[in-house]
Image: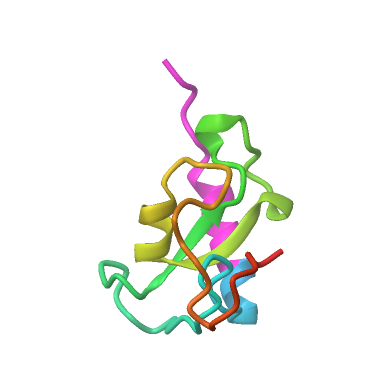
Amino acid sequence: MAPRRNITISRRLRATIARGRPPCHLCGEPINYDLPHTDPMSFELDHIVPLARGGADHISNAAASHRACNRTKGDRTDGGPILRRSGSLARPQ
């Protein structure tokens, strides 16, 4: 059984990233940070290297994403099937 995550760390990461209001790092589109958390276009913290794959719960491994983009990515490390909606085929760095 996996160890329990520290919710305080996750909340701090969310608050730190949300403060800057960056666009979704997966698709490149703006995020509406005022939407309810259940909305597919709302802000969700994405772990670049998923925790399930050994990623750290640290700011260097966290980025802003839409809830829908993050759910599509899942626990993949390659970013999944999401292409930037901005028209660029390059993945965000």
Q: Nearer the viewer, residue 50 or 35?
A: 50
* Quadrant position of residue 51: top right
Residue under the image location 52 percent in, 39 percent down:
6
Question: What colouring does the structure picture have?
Answer: rainbow
Is 10 one of the magenta-colored residues? yes
Is 6 one of the magenta-colored residues? yes
The residue lying furthest to the left in this view is 38
Picture layout, residue 24 above or below residue 45: below
Left or right: 57 with respect to 1?
right
Residue under the image location 57 percent in, 46 percent down:
78
The residue lying furthest to the top in this view is 1
Residue under the image location 52 percent in, 56 percent down:
46
Picture layout, residue 64 above or below residue 22: above
Per the rendered image, the range of residues in magenta is 1-15
Left or right: 31 with respect to 53?
left
Quarter of the image with the N terminus in it: top left
At which x and y percent is residue 56? Answer: 65, 39
Left or right: 40 with respect to 14?
left
Q: How many labels does the image show?
A: 0
Residue under the image location 44 percent in, 52 percent down:
73
Picture layout, residue 65 above or below residue 49: below
At which x and y percent is residue 67? Answer: 37, 64
Is most of the magenta stretch helix, strand or loop? helix
At which x and y percent is residue 93? Answer: 71, 64
